[in-house]
Image: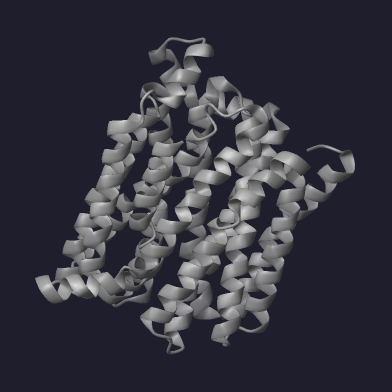
Amino acid sequence: MVVLTIMQIVGTVGVGIAPSIGVLLAGEVTDNEAWAGLARTSSTLGAALLGLPLGNLAARFGRRTALTSGWWIAAAGSALLVLAAQASMVVPLFAGLLLIGAGSAVSLQSRFAATDLAEQHHKGRSLALIVWVGTIGSVLGPNLGVPGQAIGDRTGLNVYAGAFLIAAVCLALAGLIVFLWLRPDPLLLLQRTAPEPASSEQHEQSRVRLVLAELRVNSAARFALLAILTAQIVMVAIMTMTPVHLANHGDSITIVGVTISLHIAGMYALSPLVGVTADRYGHRLAIGLGIIVFLASLVIGAVKPYDTGWIVVSLILLGVGWSFVNVAGSALFSTVISDETRASSQGSVDALSNLCGATAAFAAGPLLALSSFSTLSVLAILVLMPLTVLNVSRDRTGRT
């Protein structure tokens, strides 16, 4: 837990740069709204594409190998973005944003790593702790423009290139920390007490089929999956377009950075409380609280779209709503999934979550251009409805 904590703080500094400075860089380099929209989704798409392979890598070789690989892939992506930012090159921009998504994938995987050896009634608390410590790095990441400018003044790099250079160092360091000190490997230690029934080669080939088969018969896992996916779609769609919305109405890069930082603080700062709530009072209650906070955020976004102060409040609540739904859903999933498919299932969930987030971010761009921020908020409310109905129905049946 100590190693995971330090790794998460350092690594999320690099990951946190994508939702703010990465979004602005996409518009700067492409100078085309359609291409910029695609570039904005690249890091989330990268997390989706790499989530399942990294999950399978963990299942076969352990958390240390998977987490190290993910952080170092992200560091390579950030280094490419230094080149893209400095030379205004489109191909390195897309490749770099795609690869930096590996950092998001392993940052998510680390929360599941925290539950590998946790006691059953403390899984929510352990998962939430790793989510919470990511607050430090994730809040600093969107504000790397300030030290990036200082580095640029001394090296000749522009502000974006300087920021991504800092991110690359942080991502590489996170990989080194876990490579050197995550010993013994928590997942391999868990697997020694619950050996997989098939040979490694046979199990590798059937991993996806086993995950799908379990989801078909495990209703609690399906409910947890719906909660995770819904939270990701709603949060990413609004969060990704907020920097664009603020910039279009004259707000500075500093305001954008502070807004995203406060949003990310909302995502992570209360996660220990969410974990304790889920462990003590049930996952359904925690998810229900998250839905209520989500609705408050989206109503503010729909009613006060041009008031920067209210948009900041809306983004903070958006982060808090995501925290309750995602942390509680992830803790529930980790509790109800079988040991045989644990790492692969978790990797699949994160991959699907990021794929849904990438799709939402890509769709949100044209929607914002064709309509308004208010319309985008109303559509996000509609996305919340299936989870709301199912959560209420589960309450009436008395299930967790």
Q: Is residue 393 left or right of residue 260?
A: right
Examine the image and state in which quarter residue 63 appears. Answer: top left
Which residue is the extreme one toward the left? 155
Q: Toward the viewer: 99 or 161?
A: 161
Q: Toward the viewer: 202 or 339?
A: 339
Tell how many labels: 0
Q: In this view, does 3 lie to the left or right of 372?
A: left
Q: Work out whether residue 15 can be spotted.
A: yes
Which residue is the extreme one toward the bottom? 250
Q: Position of residue 203 (x, y in %)?
A: 45, 17
Q: Toward the viewer: 123 or 228?
A: 123
Please name the residue shown 20% across and 56% down the image: 79
Q: Quadrant of the C terminus?
A: top right
Please name the residue shown 56% across and 58% down the image: 269
Q: Work out whether residue 365 can be spotted.
A: no
Q: Is residue 272 left or right of residue 75?
A: right
Q: Position of residue 311 (x, y in %)?
A: 57, 79
Examine the image and state in which quarter residue 28 appears. Answer: bottom left
In the rendered view, tell whether residue 303 sits above or below residue 280.
below
Q: Toward the viewer: 316 or 300?
A: 316
In the rendered view, tell whether residue 335 sits above or below residue 38.
above
Please name the residue shown 57% across and 57% down the image: 233
In the rendered view, tell whether residue 373 sits above or below residue 162.
below
Q: Where is residue 287 in the image (x, y as percent from the top left)?
A: 71, 50
Scheme by which the image is coloured = one colour
In the rendered view, tell whether residue 11 sits above or below residue 257.
above
Examine the image and state in which quarter residue 250 appears. Answer: bottom left
Q: Position of residue 69 (x, y in %)?
A: 30, 37
